[in-house]
Amino acid sequence: MEKVSFHDQIDKNKRYSVLLGGIVFSFLVVFIYVISQIFAPELSIVFLMFGVVIIFVYTYGSYNYGDKVVLAATNAKPVKENDRRYTHLINVVEGLAIAAGIPKPKIYVIESDEINAFATGKNPEHASVAVTTGLLNNLKRDEIEGVIGHELSHIRNYDIRFATLVAVLVGLVAIISHMFLRTFRYGGKSERDKGGILILIGIILAIFAPIVARLVQFAVSRRREFLADASSVQLTRYPEGLASALEKIMKINMGKMKVSEAVSHLFFVDPNKSALDSLYATHPPLKERIKILRSM
Amino acid sequence: MKASENFKLLQEQLEGIENKVAYSRQFYNDSVLGFNNTITTVPGKYFAGMTGKTKSKEFFEIKEAERKPVKVEF
């Protein structure tokens, strides 16, 4: 049973990744077309050709180098193989990688008092897992194993490919929409008379695209978290480790990790707490996760 | 001081190696379980019949004594 379900999940993630790339790609092409129609209708073909090339390169780049962008955005530093401070972390990752049947991912550490972790990459062969120093200092070995097991499950299930693409592409859509709205707001009067309906389309696209992008981010990540919790237990055979790690996180974390919203859905627990927690949360509530783990 | 630090490292490495052995065994047995389930249930059963892979694999089992942590003597 278990086997079948995670293979299904892998196929789904690969499919969704292609779909997401395609949707963002076509959205941007339409967008560029609308912009060029508004500002320089006679040059729209040239615009479009340049635009398509640039967007293609960007989408391709997000697929191949998205993990580097995410790691840089979170200030994660690579761990050297012989660094004695991290021997136990390296051993835990190596052991669980064997259990999950994936190659050992690259290991990174983030300086932060919060307990958190994330995984990124395009496939298990090119994957990285990062943990905070707060996690290493506050959690016991079996608790660390639970968290790492959770992250390695994301890697094995190809959640990382989709989540990393979402992080990078969603960021791009937000930036472009924002740029468009600003250009329009400060644009000259003469341009406003042209276009008409096209400008309206442009504005609607620019307003709704980031909202839709955020909704995708929320929707995709919550269910995956439960699945990764369950897979983690399958690897460690010890639900209590992960449950008590989550309990410590409830006590210790202040929700004040300084990371961009675009990458927050990659993390083990939500790095930023907001007033709109339940509505906007990229993660299911900790209490619910603990309850499910304790009932396993 | 130095010696105790080294000893700690040794202990850590031993624990790491023990875990890796256990995890390898677990991964093997999980794979066997998945394989056996597939060839005995529908629809995998029919494909297994077609390709002649109908024999279920054996689990890797060890004696209780081998499960205990290794003793290190100096």
Image (cartoon, rainbow, N blue to C red):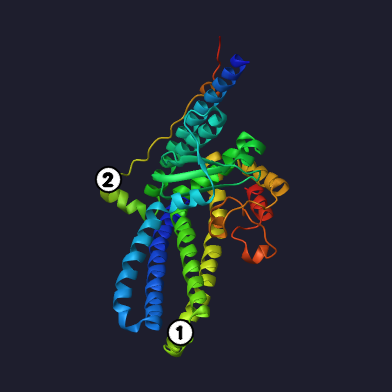
Q: Residue at x 32, y 53 (%)?
A: B46
On screen, residue B27 above or below A224: above
For this orientation, the residue located farthest to the top is B74
Residue B3 appears in the picture as rendered: yes
SS assignment at label 1: helix
Question: In the displayed image of the protein, which residue is found farthest to the right?
Answer: A251
Q: What amino acid is labelled 1 in the image?
A: Ile
Which one is in front, A288 or A180?
A180
Residue located beneath label 1 in the image: A199
Up the image or down, A34 lies above or below A155; here it is: below
A238 in relation to A175, above or below: above
Q: Which amino acid lies under the numbered mark 2 shown in the image of this protein?
A: Gly
Which label belongs to residue B52? 2
The answer to whether one can see residue A6 in this image is no
State left or right for residue A22 relative to residue B23.
Answer: left
Residue that appears at 54% across and 27% down: A84
Q: Which chain carries label 1?
A: A
- Residue A199, percent from left and from top: 46, 84
Are dots 2 and 1 on a single chain? no
Q: Which of A148 and A68 is in front in this view?
A: A68
Q: Mark 2 lies on which chain?
A: B
Q: Residues within 10 Å of mark 1 (few under 14, many from 20)?
A: many
- The x and y percentages for residue A86 are 55, 32
The residue sitting at 29% across, 72% down in the picture is A49
Residue A16 appears at what percent x and percent y?
Answer: 42, 63
Q: Is residue A102 above or below residue A12?
A: above
Q: Distance between the residues labelled 2 and 1?
A: 65 Å
Element carrying mark 2: loop
- Point out residue A4 in the picture as x, y percentages from the top left corner: 43, 53
Q: Residue at x 41, y 68 (%)?
A: A24
Comparing B50 with B14, the one in front is B14
